[in-house]
Amino acid sequence: MLLGAQRATLLRVESREWAVVAAAWSDGTAPPVPVGHRGALDGRGIVGRMLVDPRPVRVEDFDEVGGVVAELMRDLGIRRGAGGPIILGGRVWGAVTAVWPADVAMPAGAEHRVAAFAELVSYAIETPVAMTVLTEESPPDAARFAHASVTPVVELAAFALAPAPTR
């Protein structure tokens, strides 16, 4: 799993108020957020902050952030998170996020490693085929196709970013 996180999510920004889950993973201790789930952006969470300033974001304690996103994170048992923007065409298309529960520390520099991962995902999405199926005019099965085309790159990057096994 990405940096030992409990969950990782690839989100697509629909508007300044909403993001949708395009792909999600879990370490097995909690279910991943369902693909297609829409989440509110209130400007305080990871993706909301990226829309203002498209840089890596680190949140040590969602309780200190407040707002709609913090309430959702609390409900999911999530305390901290990091994310990196997916930039396409000079704007924030979406983000990759990784989150940790209250009893697990977030690694130092996690936000920069997740951002490096998000940059790899940007390259995968930016391919002409992926861009064709990820537009607003996409056919209904485009999300499934895009997920299938991006998932191998995402999984490879997650493996590369995983902490080294201890002996």
Image (tube, grey):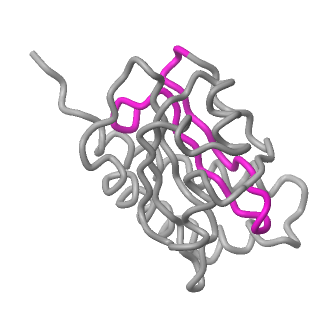
Residue depicted at 44% across the width and 57% down the height: 57
Q: How many marks?
A: 0
Residue depicted at 90% across the width and 55% down the height: 140
Residue depicted at 51% across the width and 64% down the height: 85
Q: Quadrant of residue 166?
A: top left
Percent coordinates x, y for residue 5 in the rendering: 42, 31
* Left or right of 19, for residue 127: left
As drawn, 1 above or below 58: above
Q: Quadrant of residue 78?
A: top right
Please report the bounds of the magenta region as a residue range: 1-29
Percent coordinates x, y for residue 15 in the rendering: 79, 68
Which residue occupies the extreme bottom position in the image?
90
Percent coordinates x, y for residue 59 in the rendering: 45, 45
> Where does the N terminus fall, quadrant-wise?
top left
Which residue occupies the extreme left position in the image?
167
Q: Quadrant of residue 134?
A: bottom right
Asked if residue 142 is among those painted magenta in the image, a careful observer would answer no
> Where does the C terminus fall, quadrant-wise?
top left
